[in-house]
Amino acid sequence: MADLVKELISGVVDSVLKEILKKTTRRTRTKRSRRKTRAAATTAAARKTTSAKRKPARKQISKRRTAAGRSRHRRG
């Protein structure tokens, strides 16, 4: 009976140790590689398939009010 209990306990301990010490199959990626793969999803090639081609942003220029615009601004 004692041998049976001893064998059972040693089997459990062995399996637990194997589980703890075994190497994981998937390695964790570095932050840099995660950033790189995330950025690749938003490239022009990916955008081309999802939506229509967008125009580049226009440079903002200051608008000068015309005389009529200034007059309207004063009244309003």
Image: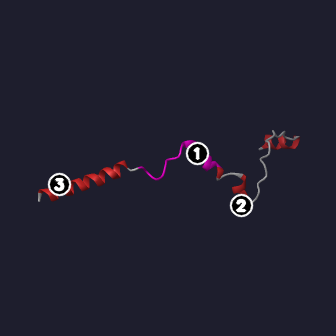
The residue at the point 72 percent across, 55 percent down is 45
Label 2 – label 3 distance at C-alpha? 64 Å
> Which residue does the numbered mark 1 point to in the structure image?
33
- Whether residue 30 is in magenta: the answer is yes
How busy is the neighbourhood of tag 2: few (under 14 within 10 Å), some, or many (20 plus)? few
The amino acid type, in three-letter code, at marker 1 is Ser
- The N terminus: image quadrant: bottom left
Q: Earlier in the sequence, mark 2 or mark 3?
A: 3
- The C terminus: image quadrant: top right
The residue at the point 72 percent across, 53 percent down is 44
The furthest residue to the front: 3
The mark found on residue 49 in the picture is 2
Q: Secondary structure at mark 1?
A: helix
Q: Indicate the position of residue 10 as horizontal and vertical percent values.
A: 22, 53
Judging depth in this view, the residue of 41 and 22 nearest the camera is 22
> Which residue does the numbered mark 3 point to in the structure image?
6
Q: Secondary structure at mark 2?
A: helix
Q: Secondary structure at mark 3?
A: helix
How busy is the neighbourhood of tag 1: few (under 14 within 10 Å), some, or many (20 plus)? few
Q: Is residue 1 above or below residue 22?
A: below
The amino acid type, in three-letter code, at marker 2 is Thr
Q: Nearer the viewer, mark 2 or mark 3?
A: 3
The residue at the point 12 percent across, 56 percent down is 2
Q: Which residues are magenta?
A: 23-39
The amino acid type, in three-letter code, at marker 3 is Lys
For the rendered model, the colour scheme is secondary structure
Judging depth in this view, the residue of 20 and 47 nearest the camera is 20
Label 1 – label 3 distance at C-alpha? 49 Å
